[in-house]
Amino acid sequence: MVTKEEDCLPPTPLTELETVRSIEIVESSSLSPVWLLVIFCIINLLNYMDRGAIASNGVNGSTKSCNDKGKCTLASGIQGHFNLSNFEDGVLSSSFMVGLLIASPIFAILAKRLIGVGLTVWTVAVFGCGSSFAFWFIVLCRMFVGVGEASFISLAAPFIDDNAPQKQKAAWLGMFYMCIPSGVALGYVYGGYVGKHFSWRYAFWGEAALMAPFAVLGFVMKPLQLKGAETSTNDNHLQVGNEIEHDQFEVSTEPSKSSYANAVLKSFTGFAKDMKVLFKEKVFVVNVLGYVSYNFVIGAYSYWGPKAGYNIYKMRNADIIFGAVTIISGIVGTLSGGFILDRVSATIPNAFKLLSGATFLGAVFCFTAFTLKSLYGFIALFALGEFLVFATQAPVNYVCLHCVKPSLRPLSMAISTVAIHIFGDVPSSPLVGIVQDHINSWRKTALMLTSILFLAATIWFTGKTNLNS
């Protein structure tokens, strides 16, 4: 665990006077913690609904193909419209992660002020996806979708953990992360319906309209503050009540180049120190390594699942079936993981036990499901496997939050997010596309992918050992 305190990132001269961090969230926000939890959940739901929509058969579609009997299916959706290979289609899935990865560490510091800007970027970028005229343009728009998502992703989990009742912290995290499978599943159904009855473009335009009110709310509500964010106590000023008293001199609103350079240097030095502390924490490293392996599989599942199910089991309504299975298993599994962790006592050792056990059993059921020829047998086992796999959402993020001191939690979540994407679901979708292009068997591809869950379970199993050491 954390053994010593490190200095937080020093603010720049301008932002130092602009906002003094408070200890209590209620003092800095006009909305209650419960309402902000609801807002975060809805935003998270819309983010992942977008991922589900672009993966749905209605929006993603397929290229023109003909079977041995000469019966052909017409090109449809994005893949058919732009005539994409499976690899290019996989790149489309991963492109939004580029913006997310670049922006997450930045928004870990600035999200309290720029959440409205970020959600506006998300809204405009999603609208641009629907208006795309070329493959490169939709890839660019997906990158900016990731930038928008980064505006709140680093702040949400630390805020929820700060303000949840002591005995319900994991349950609150479970409610938030429940929106991931729910959003993806809702996106499958939404994208499948809109793509079939209207056009794949309308699916993106509808998402932009749904997010727009929350982008506006991000500008009008007061900035959020996290507990554990220490009040600045430098020599130039000190905080008294709600005012700032200058005990030596008045700070100029136009700092010199040298003072600005010093502030930037201090910020970089503080960031480097925090990163050093973070990566020296063995529990954090082990947890993220397991999370990377887990997310490699889940990311590919969420994007290729409907298409794999359609081809393996000839599902007529693959979007609806996968959507229903994912939303039920995801909601029940994610909430159950949070409630179980609270019930057995929310500690890091218990979280690792739940992570390794649930992931291993989930891998067994999912792997077995893809070996079956019966559609109904597949649905039953895959649903049970997804239930167990999604039970990890609250525990894995609980470990990320509680293996570091409070002031490092936003950075911990940001670096965790960067790692699980850049080494997890960013490469997994294109790689699965390459494998499928090569072996041309969705069943074998799915089995190879699912086996990686056993690696995740093994890594998390070692977590308790690293904690003890």
Image: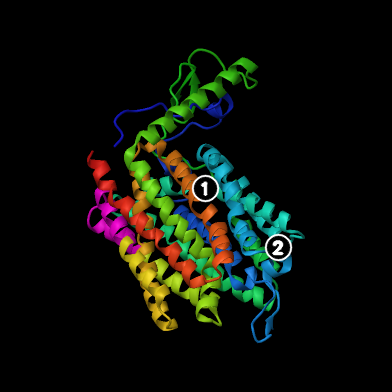
**In the orientation shown, which residue stands out farthest toward the top?**
248
Query: Could you tell me which residue is drawn at 50 percent across and 80 percent down?
Result: 313
Cα distance in 3D space between marks 1 and 2: 25 Å
Residue 270, horizontal then vertical, whole percent: 47, 26
**Magenta residues?**
335-359
Residue beneath disc 1: 422
Locate residue 304, reporting x and y percent.
Answer: 54, 66
The answer to whether residue 373 is above or below residue 301 is: below
Residue ID at (49%, 48%)? 423
* First in residue order: circle 1 vs circle 2: 2
Q: As shown in the figure, which amino acid type bears the numbered disc 1?
A: Ile
- The dot on residue 130 is 2
Secondary structure category for the residue under label 1: helix
Looking at the rendered image, the quarter that the N terminus falls into is: top left
User: In terms of image quadrants, where is residue 331?
Assistant: bottom left
- Give the amino acid type for the residue marked by disc 2 in the picture: Gly
Q: Is residue 236 toward the left or the right of residue 259 in the image?
A: left
Disc 1: CA contacts within 10 A as few (<14), some (14-19) or many (>=20): some
Residue 171 placement (x, y as % from top left): 34, 57
State the predominant SS element of the stretch in magenta.
Answer: helix
